[in-house]
Amino acid sequence: MNKPTAGEDASELAREIERLRQEHRDLDAAIEAIVATGAGDQLQIQRLKKRKLVLRDRLSYLEDMVTPDIIA
């Protein structure tokens, strides 16, 4: 097996970040739809919001890997 190059790693990270962003947007839309229709219970909404927070934390971590802090 060949070790992935830095470009492949960056490309893979970019794809993962975009996938997580899309999932985050989808969850946001799902929460809004549930609230608008009144079809869901609070526990369901709470679980979706918790999932959104987990995604946001993972996104922040991955984005920091792509653009590390620069010490000035």
Image (cartoon, rainbow, N blue to C red):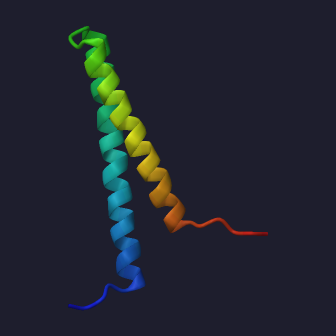
At which x and y percent is residue 30? 27, 27
Relative height, residue 26 to residue 14 (above, below): above
Left or right of residue 29: residue 66: right
At which x and y percent is residue 48? 31, 29
At which x and y percent is residue 25? 35, 38
Q: Quadrant of residue 72?
A: bottom right
The residue most toward the top is 38
Give the total number of marks visible in the rendering. 0
Q: Is residue 33 visible?
A: no
Identify which residue is drawn at 41% across, 73% down. Answer: 10
Q: Quadrant of residue 11?
A: bottom left
Identify which residue is drawn at 46% across, 46% down. Answer: 57
Identify which residue is drawn at 37% across, 47% down. Answer: 21
Relative height, residue 10 to residue 3 (above, below): above
Relative height, residue 54 to residue 32 (above, below): below
Left or right of residue 64: residue 15: left
